[in-house]
Image (tube, rainbow, N blue to C red):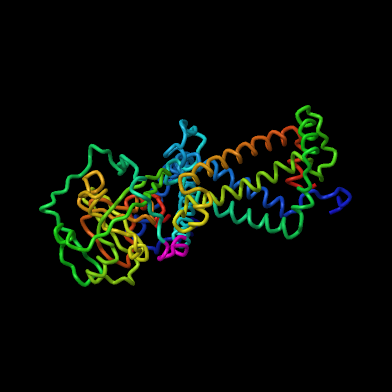
Amino acid sequence: MNGKYSPPPAGNGEVLIREGLKDIGARLEQPLRRIFLQRALSLGGLSLLSGCAAIDEESVEAALMKVSRFNDKAQAWLFDPRRLAPTYPESMITRPFPFNAYYGEDEIRQVDAEAYRLEVTGLVADRHAWTLAELRAMPQTAQVTRHICVEGWSAIGKWGGIPFADFLRRVGADTSARYVGFKCADDYYTSIDMPTALHAQTLLALTYDGRELPPRYGFPMKLRMPTKLGYKNPKHIQAIFVTNTYPGGYWEDQGYNWFGGS
Amino acid sequence: MSASSIPRIHPLWVRLAHWLNALAVTVLVLSGWRIYDASPLFAFELPRELTLGGWLGGAIQWHFAAMWLFAGNGMVYLAANLLGRRLFRRFFPISLSALLADLAAALRGQLSHADPGRYNAVQRLAYLFVMVDSLLLVLSGLVLWKSVQFPFLRELLGGYETARRVHFLAMAGMVGFVGIHLLMVALVPRTLLTMIRGR
């Protein structure tokens, strides 16, 4: 700073002393500032370099995320609500059907059937919590379809349950809303687009292969969509909510594509 | 350009398409290998150090970004090649006898590269192969990405699981092509210059 020194008005001792102290302070400051500057050049230089690398990595990740959002739109555009996924004869069911989750088989959650209540919230008319008996009393259907995992493998299974479109109409859901979100007993969460929620093959599955859905496949209820990849099919569903606010998902928040359609 | 006396071998659009394609193929193959490793189709895994994306989610992001470049650039290249009839001028005709003669000469290391503006029969076949192989990669990739939305393609390729194998084999074909291509460029480095400068 080229601050111009203005002489203190004569006769003001206090100002004189203050100016003097400032001078001393400034002189003391010099070596300290030099040290700080040197530090800044070495440490700061390093952090600047690593900072740059971090920025680059971040911007690459941000760009890839942008493409992923674009891919969501492309898939929503490609999605034909009337197009059905292929169905297979029961003889083609993969046995045993593979277990898959973000945790191992030894950590499969046990949900108490008696205490179970399905929460339904958000943009719905009827927000009452459903018991398992009520869910089982709804008209059911079954289908044999291919489950495709994001890892590439696929397996054919048979799921039975409530067409999700029927359920959404029954609870008076706002079907013009953008998302349906799910929260699960295994702390998993995900969300889907409304057109897929209303697809004829989207089921709230209560059975697997004609029997009560076993814990390893998501007791008491999972969402089954042959039009989406495995990670979009949550197990052990505890809460369903209809919303216009993007809810994300367990894997989606880490970088898996949100639409995840097939 | 004062060098108009030197014939231009690759027009600018071909060079652009070539290098964009090289970038797309590199990203797709390296990220594809990481995706393969998440659930190997065969009894081997690909070396993790050679893959791109760090983890499955990252690899898929790279793969599903580069696919647009690969498909878009490839379509522009093919369209320009067909409309300008360059495809027929540069890559046809191929006769079996010319192919055998050129292959024998190539294996003896006696293939002439006197006229870089003319592809020999082996080159023609190799470049036509990689065009068809790229198309197969895109089509099988579409089935893997959207098997429900493209039922005709899915059935054409024998279903989702067969499409996986087709996609893998087409990748192997692409990598094989790139390997030989790079070897040939190393043997005749002038071709690298023509793909950069055009002459």
Quadrant holding the C terminus of chain A:
bottom left
Q: At which x and y percent is residue A31? A: 44, 42
In the rendered image, the residue lying farthest to the right is: B5
Q: For the point 76% across and 54% down, which residue is it? A: B86
Q: At which x and y percent is residue B191? A: 76, 40
Q: Is residue A1 above or below residue A155?
A: below
Res A119 → quadrant: bottom left
Q: Is residue B198 visible?
A: no
Side of A12 where A61 appears, left or right: right
Q: At which x and y percent is residue B22? A: 63, 45
Magenta segment includes A76: yes
Res A248 → quadrant: bottom left
Q: For the point 44% across and 56% down, which residue is it? A: B148
**B186 or A259, nearer to the observer:** A259
Side of A95 where A33 appears, left or right: right
Q: Which residues are magenta?
A: A75-83
Q: For the point 51% across and 57% down, which residue is it? A: B152
**A32 or B63, nearer to the observer:** B63
Side of A250 where B106 appears, left or right: right
**A105 or A155, nearer to the observer:** A155
Q: Is residue B187 above or below residue B87?
A: above
Q: At which x and y percent is residue A142? A: 28, 56
